[in-house]
Image (cartoon, helix red, strand yellow):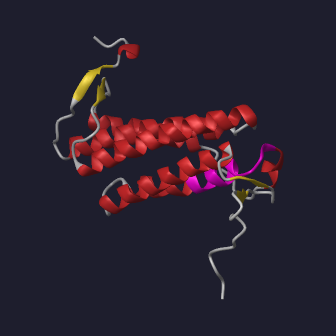
Amino acid sequence: MNRIYTRTGDAGTTGIHGGARVPKDDIRIEANGDLDELNCQIGVVRSMSAGASFDAILHDIQKNLMTVMSLVATPSEERDKNPNPLPEDLVATCEATMDALTENAGPALHFLLPGGTPLAARLQLARAVCRRAERRLWTLNRQDPVPEEILKYINRLSDLLFVMARCELARQDWPEERWQAFSYKNQL
């Protein structure tokens, strides 16, 4: 019988790609834990929007996050041995998706209070988890370089989740609860 448990983590360590063991609270594991939580949040969003126009986008995001987590679990000196490549157009695809969705929701001119429809609220929660994962990746990057494409992708992904939340509000004809204008964009 194949068991899911190995008992190898009982002493507070876990294995990473390449075979090394690190403490379970190592920044690499913390970053991957946040990415895993993000992937789970996106899974919840997908379950709420089954058949909706976001399903294919979210499915691709989940697959990309699995590759990202594999690469994050791999120390930089071992990364060339990792068999899981990122799509070459990862960031560009994320940006193009945002641009297309923004046409439906209109320009983002304000900070919004998270909420609205249940789906929009879950997308905002995923966005917040994505931002936390991004912070952990930058902490890891100071100790062991994270591929630049991953850092850019996670930054864009949080923006994409924000845009998707806005699209959901627009689709449901639900008003955005605005807090204040984005001053850094010099809005009037």
Q: Quadrant of the C terminus?
A: top left
Q: Residue furthest front?
A: 11
Q: Main secondary structure of the magenta part?
A: helix
Res 97 seen here: no
- Say which residue appears at 59% left-offset and 38% top-offset: 136
Image spot of residue 184 (x, y percent): 41, 15
Compare residues 155 and 89 and report the one nearer the observer: 155
- Say which residue appears at 42% left-offset and 54% top-offset: 42
Q: Residue furthest right?
A: 77
Residue 72 part of the magenta segment: yes
Image spot of residue 112 (x, y percent): 28, 30
Q: Quadrant of the N terminus?
A: bottom right
- Say which residue appears at 28% left-offset and 51% top-offset: 119
Res 93 seen here: yes
Vertical side of 35 occupied by 163: above or below: above
Vertical side of 153 occupied by 112: above or below: above
Q: Which residues are magenta?
A: 65-76
Compare residues 80 and 23 and report the one nearer the observer: 23
Residue 125 part of the magenta segment: no
Residue 127: which quarter of the image?
A: top left
| Left or right of 102 on screen, residue 27 | right
- Say which residue appears at 62% left-offset and 52% top-offset: 69
Residue 7: which quarter of the image?
A: bottom right
Vertical side of 187 occupied by 20: above or below: below
Image spot of residue 26 (x, y percent): 68, 46
Image spot of residue 116 (x, y percent): 22, 42
Q: How many marks?
A: 0
Q: Residue furthest bottom?
A: 1
